[in-house]
Structures are given as structure tokens and as C-alpha cells.
Amino acid sequence: MATTPTRRPGRPRPGEPTLTREAILTAALALVDEQGIEALSMRKLAARLQVDPMSIYHHVPNKAALVSGLVRSVFAEMAPPLDEGDWPDRVCAWARAYRDVALAHPHLVLEIVTDAAAASGAAIQISEPLYAALAAAGLTPRAVLHAAGTLVDFVNGYALGASAPAGADPMGDHLAAMDPALVPTMRRIHEAVADGEPGGGFEAGLDIIVRGIAP
């Protein structure tokens, strides 16, 4: 008596679209952007793609590999600055491009900052223009490393701060509640810039770093 072949778990059913790694990463990034990295699971991702959860494992072996793929996809969006012009302009252009990518996907910023395995490979694909600009400044190899690390840490910190809920200012709230006699300088400085232009901190910090890099 003839038997009906058993469909292997994860194999697409007849008529289902073929699942691809690119489609998986696109859906995963949309899920993370909407709900945060904590919401990312193979089961939720499969539901969004309307496929068997096991089918995802044919393309991505585990969640760690999925997150690494997401970080690579996000970094691939970054438009590298042109390899021309003065080195400070090139450094600033790189920092702004990196900031824009990080702010476009704030739920992934913490993974980029804390997960070396996820970020290291992806970081290489975007860092060559930064290293080239710093080398053009006449820095020693060690100074290039230190300058690049400082700049990346600055942009990561800015992006983390910018991803906080709108209107949140815990430091300002604590400062306002303290006895002014204990923190007179901080109160004076913060009150003096309270009505300053929003978002100006990034350009000010970038300017400080670039001026510090100059040989």
C-alpha cells in the first residue's frame, strides 16, 4: 500500500513562498523596531512571517546569529563619507552617519554597545573610512585606535541617551531637588543652558573630540 511522504519540519508547504535569510532579517528588524529586542523570538518571528518556526532555523541557527545578522543589516544602511576633503570633515561626517543609523534603530543600540560578538564583525565593514580619516591627520597607529574608540563611544553614548523616553531628564530632576548650596556650580551651569537649542550636545561634543584629536 502506498504511503504519503511525511513533510520534514520546517520545509515549506506546497504553495508557500520560499523563505530567505533576507526576508527573515527584514521581519526581525521590523519586530525589534516596533517592540524592542526583548520581543524578538523565533516563535514571534515565525508568526509574523506566517511560517513554521523550524523553517527559520534552516537560515539562522540561533537567536545570537539572528541578532548578529540584524546588526550587520543595520550597519549596511550607513552611507560612508567620501574619501576626500579635510580629515576633520571626514571624521565628523562619519560620526553623523553612524549617529543617524543608531537613532533609526534605538532598540538595537544597546546590543551594538554591549554585545561584542554581534557588533565586532559589522563594525569592521563601516570603520575603514574613519580609520583612513584619522590616519590622514598624521596620528600614530596607536593614536588612531584611541581616537576611533573615543569617537565610537561618544556616538554610542549619545544614541543611548537620545533613545530615552521623550521629556525624561532624571539628572535634571535630581539636581533641582538638591540643596543648591551642595552643587552651586552645577546648578548655575544647568540653569544657564536650560533654554539652549535641543540636540546641540552632539555637535558640541564632536567638536571637542575633533579638536582634541588634532596633532
Image: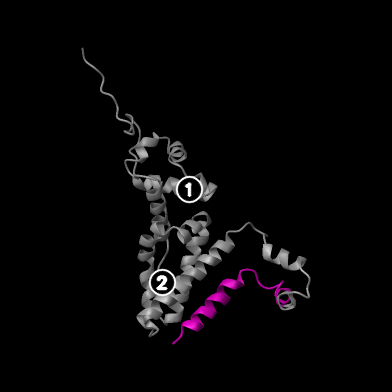
Verify whether residue 139 appears in magenta.
no
Instruction: Decide which of 41, 47 is in the foreground and name it.
Output: 41
Q: Nearer the viewer, mark 2 or mark 1?
A: 1
> What amino acid does circle 1 point to?
Ala
- In the displayed structure image, the side of residue 38 where residue 173 appears, left or right: right
User: With respect to residue 136, does 61 lie above or below?
Assistant: above
Quarter of the figure that contains the C terminus: bottom left
- In the displayed structure image, the side of residue 61 where residue 41 appears, left or right: right
> What amino acid does circle 2 point to?
Pro
> Badge 2 is on which residue?
81
* Mark 2 residue crowding within 10 angstroms, few (<14) / some (14–19) / many (20+): many
| Magenta residues, start to end | 189-215
- Display coloring: one colour
Verify whether residue 204 appears in magenta.
yes
User: With respect to residue 52, does 154 lie above or below?
Assistant: below
Q: Which mark is residue 10?
A: none
Number of on-image labels: 2
Residue name at image x 49 percent, y 69 percent: 153
